[in-house]
Amino acid sequence: MLKAKISEIRAKSLDEIKGSQDEKKLYAIKVKYLGRNGELTKILKSLKDMEAEERRSAGSIANQARQEIEKELQKRGKDLDNQIDWKKEKIDVTLPGEKNEIGSLHPIALVYREIEKIFSSMGFEVVCGPELETDWYNFTSLNFPLDHPARDMQDTFWIKSPKEKMVLRTHTSPVQVRSMEKRKPPFRIIVPGRVFRNEATDATHEHTLHQFEALMVGDEVNVGHFKYIAKQFFSAFFEKNVDIRLRPSFFPFTEPSFEFDISCTVCGGKGCPSCKNGKWLEIGGAGMVNQNVFTAAGYPRNRYQGFAWGFGIERLAMMKYKIDDIRWFESGDLRFIKQF
Amino acid sequence: MKYSYTWLKELSGTKKKPQQLASLLTMRSFELEDMKTEGKETQLEFSILPNRGHDALSHIGMAREICACEGRKFKNDFLRFYLRMNHGMSVDIKDKKLCFRYIGAVIEGVKIGPSPKWMQERLLVSGVKPINSIVDITNYVMLETGQPLHAFDAEKTSGKIIVRRAKKGEEIKLLDEKAYELNENDLVIADSEKALALAGVMGGFDSSITGKTTSIILESANFNSTSIRKTRSSNNIITESSHRFEREIDPNLAGMAMARALEHIRKVCGPKINIKAMTDVYPKKIKSWKISLNTDYVNRLLGEKIAISKMKNILGNLGISVKVAKNILKCEIPTIRIDLKSQEDLIEEVGRIYGYENIKEQSPVSAVETPPENLKRNFESELRDIMAGLGFSEVMNYSFYGKEDIDRCGMKEDSHIEVSNPLSSEQQYLRRSLVPNILKNIELNLKNFPKVQIFEIGNKFCNDKGEYSEGTILLGALADGFAKDALFSKLKGKLESLLDKIAVKDAEYQGLNAEYKFWNPSRSAKIICSGKKIGRIGEIHPQVLAKYGIKQRVAVFGLKISALTETKLSKRHYEAVRKFPSVKRDISMFVGEGIKYSDIKKKIHSAGAKLVLGVELFDIFEKAGEKSLALRIEIGADGKTMTSEGIDGVMKKITTALEKELKVKVRK
């Protein structure tokens, strides 16, 4: 009779423990069965009034049940402890994140990076040179005779110098002779850098500009090679097929010399407002290295052939990012720079 | 130069319409600048390349070009002429290096009036204002042949024509009615008494042709290009004449131009004119020259297979006489083409007339090699990424600033390099420091942003007693109103992250004895690495900031790229991860005035020796006027786990050393 009661309490309490959903309920169950007036406690208390034999057998069953219930209570307690309140966890995932600062690189730096990547992949070495340059490297070694109208082509900032005649380089071409002096052909180099022109600024003119120069020298480098490399470069840069067009030009340091145009990157050469229906965009100058430049660098005359070409980075950046005023580049204005 | 389409058409015989002609010439010769059509006439403006001023600044020259582009030879009767000399006139060239030829003619019985309408129209289309018959004829012939001419009123001259250098301070009033003071570098045309004209640049006012003129001296001469260039630039006059002379003209052109002018004068001024005298002083006659052109070289340089016969035709159509000897073209260059001096010059002629668009693209054949890396450039690129990651945006500033900036920043003028011909006084000096222009950026950006964090990688230029140098600097700047007193520390934290990332270890900071006055003397330091100064960090002097209109603190650091590339190259390598655990113990202390954190840190390291693995500051606070630092020290040994007694021993040593040797009181 008593044994059946104990067994019933045991089964009932274990059921309730299993079904309990929080610690409060669990505690109530503990009180209900094992508390001072708990159902099982009452039975245990009543044991002392029983016969020795009956007490022994009932006592052992009751104690077993108590231990079992305590174990289950503990286990269930632990389980409830590990349970997560997902409702409490809920957040609005559409709220913006906490602000982190990350800077922007200058668009000119980004364009340089792009150009250098493309040329490096074609085996060109990146070479730099000084911005404060001697008259020799900027002009004379590049076959600009003294007092020649060709010098007027480039408005020059002259430097007050106690020694040698110095200029702020008007182009990156001085690095041509500087590089040849240190190299034996064949070689291919590119020269990124800042250049200076003494002219007033407006939406399309700047006195401080960034240029890029490519020079390839070898035994048989020819005009066809230049056209090929130029096409490769511009097609990679604008990520579409770009055609190259050469027109006659004059630069003292190249002969023959060209102006080079690329097919309009907007319409692809069909004619549109971007190219003013001209289908072509003027990009820069190029030519086959003048033999006088080779001799200025110490090479024998008519031993090597090479091409040189250069163009302005601002113009490419303006095309690539649709920037309307060249003066933004040196403005230092974060409203502009932060867009990149 | 502006050309008349009808004139070019008449001379060249082209059947092309203006637009077609413009496209052809743009691809083969010169770029079209502008085109205007009015009635039957079209003005075509081409930009003539500097090396073609010799021949192409004329309608004849352009007509020859058109013919060559259309595959024909230019033919015209002008090319044959005869001048009958009549020595009644004396010309004396004093300086034969400045004047190579002088043809003078005295013409009497001239009646001055307007020139014929057709001539005036052609002048106008070519951008020249009609004046009177004689002046118009000289201009017309110049536009036609490229040879500038000048006419003097013979009655206003006396004695012979002398071509001489001006005397120092000699004055002359020119046709622009302005008086000029000349010097010995200027060449003048003079009579026995006075200068009549600034040779090759502009005629004199007093000897100019007027309505009353009846006899003239007509000049067709050739002057030294460099001399003309110097004269026109020192006197700041550019004329159609100086523009041509400074590009160098063929002295043989003077004869043809004189013949053409006389022909027009006869037609316009009537048969009554009398050529009283004519003299040609031409001491050193220029003859054509020869160039042997290797046809293999032509194709090798152009990368094309052009037939020898084709090359011969192209050159022939440009007026060059060519004889073929196997693969060599023996070319005789007409004297008008002063620009053709080398094989490459001729290759350009062949290439452009053949058409550059006909040259096929071809891939170069060369060995596959990885190019050497540009370490500096790559390093700069790495710095850019790190700086952006630390929240800095990149600016690029001018390499110039003005005297005002030098003064504002307390720098010295004589340590700067000066531009001879600056665009404005704000751009008179090359930047000795990147700071002044960065301060302008900060002032500008604080108007739009509460916090400005920028960097620049650029060159600075130094003048060390006449010794000029340039070097690349990375400059980082921070302005943040919320940082208040901690601005220096904020920027320094970023600098430390940067240095850590580029593997610059153990940088030390030493208070600055301000070489530049723009640093805040209490908040600036030199950055030293392996005993070498690599840069500076600090706040900008509040008074300097005020001058730039900045009302809050600004902190800046500058690093020399060259110093970094030299020290940086300690390459990273793996160090074994410690096998035995280390322990972190905190220690806090009151520090007296003037005690530097760097000294405390050094002391801890020296007291604990190898067992101190790291020292980190985690708190600073002030209590009752005393400054307290809290540090966390990491202690551990190689090869064993330290006992707690061992660690206590180390901490005791450190405490003793700090208290005994530095003015600090360790809090227990």
Image: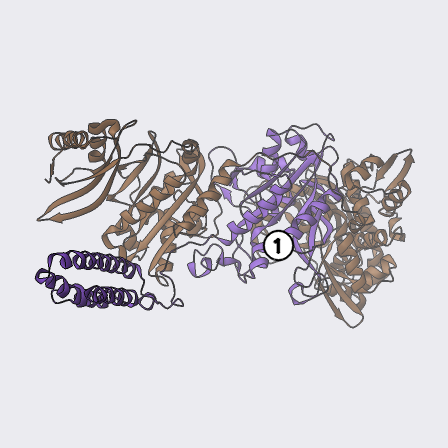
Chain colours: A purple, B brown
Residue B15 in the image: x percent, y percent? 87, 62
Q: Quadrant of residue B206?
A: bottom right
The chain that hosts pointer 1 is: B
The residue nearer to you, when weighing B161 against A108, is A108
- The residue that appears at 80% across and 41% down in the rendered structure is B335
- Residue A301 appears left or right of B80: left
Q: Which residue lies under the disc numbered 1? A: B174
Judged from the image, the secondary structure of the residue bearing numbered disc 1 is loop
Residue B371 occupies quadrant: top right
Left-right relation of A299 to B360: left
Q: Position of residue B284 (x, y in %)?
A: 78, 35
Task: Tally the marks.
Answer: 1
Against B35, is B331 above or below? above
> What percent of the width, then of the height, locates residue B184?
58, 40
Query: For this rendering, which residue is in front, B115 or A254?
Result: A254
Q: Give the position of the N terminus of chain A as an image quadrant.
A: bottom left
In depth, the one of A322 and B76 nearer the eye is: A322
> Can residue B234 be seen from the camera position used here?
no
Q: Image quadrant of residue B128? A: bottom right
Left or right of B52: which side holds B577?
left
Tell which residue pokes out farthest to the bottom in this image: B39
Disc 1 residue type? Leu
Task: Count residues near mark 1 (Cα–Cα under 10 Å), then give few for <14, some for 14-19, many for 20+.
Answer: many
Residue A331 seen in the figure: yes
- Counting from the top left corner in percent of width and height, residue A68 is at 24, 57
